[in-house]
Amino acid sequence: MTIEERFERIEHVTAGLAEAYRKDREENRQLWRDTNRQIERLAEESRAADKRLEDKIERLAEESRAADKRLEDKIERFAEEFRAADEQLQGRIESLVSAIGKLITK
């Protein structure tokens, strides 16, 4: 093999390596772009999921506050009923004690 043939061979191998490097580099760039698009898509989906979760939590909090208010109103009604029943019972006890007192004095 002559020196010229060796140089041609080296140039051919070098050109092949350069072409392989160029292809690898382009493929790596494409993978990088695809990866970035996927990351951005996942980030957007995550932000959307966070928003949906935030909305759901807010809705549940509002429902909970409304249920608390209804329970508070119901407790207040029961308390009023119990106070009225207690006053009525107190009146009956007083009248019974008074009647027993009058009966004993006779």
Image (spheres, rainbow, N blue to C red):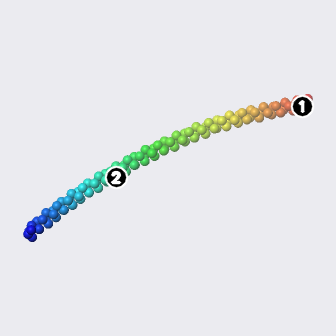
Q: Secondary structure at mark 1?
A: helix
Distance between mark 2 and mark 1 Cα atoms: 94 Å
Residue 87: percent from the left, percent from the top?
74, 35
Q: Say whether residue 102 is left or right of residue 92.
A: right
Look at the image and tell me in which quarter the C terminus lies: top right
Q: Secondary structure at mark 2?
A: helix
Kind of residue at disc 1: Ile
Q: Residues within 10 Å of mark 1 (few under 14, many from 20)?
A: few
- Most foreground residue, 38 or 7: 7
Report which residue position mark 1 lands on. 104
Q: Say whether residue 42 is left or right of residue 64.
A: left
Residue 12: percent from the left, percent from the top?
13, 63
Report which residue position mark 2 lands on. 39
Q: Say whether residue 29 is left or right of residue 84.
A: left
- Most foreground residue, 19 or 36: 19
Residue contact at pointers 2 and 1, CB within 8 angstroms: no
Residue at image coords 66%, 35%: 78
Residue 64 found in image quarter:
top right
Q: Residues within 10 Å of mark 2 (few under 14, many from 20)?
A: few
Residue at image coords 56%, 39%: 67
Residue 75: percent from the left, percent from the top?
63, 38
Kind of residue at disc 2: Ile
